[in-house]
Every structure is written in structure tokens, then in C-alpha cells.
Image: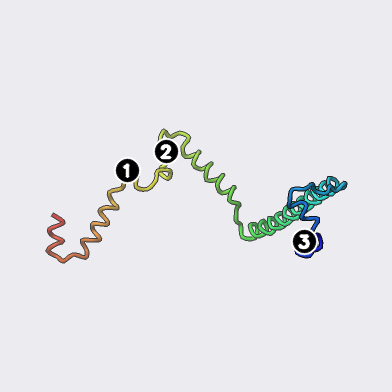
Amino acid sequence: MDFVMKQALGGATKDMGKMLGGEEEKDPDAAKKEEERQEALRQQEEERKAKHTRMEAEREKVRQTIRDKYGLKKKEEKEAEEKAAMEQACEGSLTRPKKAIPRGCGDDDEEDEESILDTVLKFLPGPLQDMFKK
């Protein structure tokens, strides 16, 4: 009977005991192997991070040469300058600067509306233009 079962399982009788709920064979070096595996993973991760920091440093050098060549500034520098300019404009003022007010909110210029009306009137026939101008 064992022979028939062994052939049916393809020689996997050791695994059969595990499947049926039997005790697994304990490897005496399992803890040591797991520790070595974890250490290898940590080392690989450190090497990967070091590689990426080196690559990023090289990219930053290239970016800086381009900035120097074309007189560009970093995004952080631009934002800092804009913020400083906004603060200087607001120092003695009790209200926000006009640039900070979103378009369409607060005081709208009526000149824009008149210019749109004038533009529309240009395309109307003469008698209609006279009616709307009155």
C-alpha cells in the first residue's frame, strides 16, 4: 500500500506528513539561516539606497550646471523671493495686496464689462447700435 501511495504522490511522502498535520522536521540551523537572510536583505537595501543617493547627487550636479549656464533659479529660491516680495508689499498695509485677491472676487473693474459691451456693439447693425447707446 505504501508503494502505491508513494507512486501516486510522486515520491512526496515527506510532504504528505506535513499536509496531514504531522510535525514538521526542524532544521537546527533555521534560525541562523533566517538571520543571515535578513542581514543580506538589509545590506542589499543599504546598497540600493546608497546607489540612489549617488545617482541623485550626480543629477543635482547636472541640474546645477544647467541653472548656472542659463541663469535659472531653483524652485525653492523663486518661491522664497516671491514670498519676501509679498511680505514687503504688505508691511504698512492693512489690506491684502491685489495680487492675492482671486480674480472675480471683490472689486471688479467695470472697464472690462464696458469693453466687452463695446466689442459686441461693433458687430451690430447701425440702428441697433444707436438703440443700445441711448
Q: Position of residue 112 (x, y in %)?
A: 29, 53
**Disc 2 vs disc 3: Cβ atoms closer than 8 Å?**
no
Q: CA distance from mark 2 to mark 1?
A: 13 Å
Identify the residue at horizontal 45%, vertical 33% (top origin). 92
Q: Is residue 94 left or right of residue 111?
A: right
State the image quarter where residue 120 is shown: bottom left
Residue occupied by mark 1: 107
Q: Quadrant of the C terminus?
A: bottom left
Q: Position of residue 70 (x, y in %)?
A: 61, 60
Q: CA distance from mark 2 to mark 3?
A: 87 Å
Q: What mark, if any, has residue 93 been given in the picture? A: none
Q: Which label's residue is closer to the chain start, 2 or 3?
A: 3
Type of amino acid under label 3: Met
Q: So how many labels did they put on this image?
A: 3
Q: CA distance from mark 1 to mark 3?
A: 90 Å
State the image quarter where residue 5 is shown: bottom right
Whether residue 115 is situated above or below residue 94 in the rendered picture:
below
Residue occupied by mark 3: 5
Q: Which label's residue is closer to the chain start, 1 or 3?
A: 3
- In-front residue for pair 24/64: 24
Q: What mark, if any, has residue 96 been given in the picture? A: 2
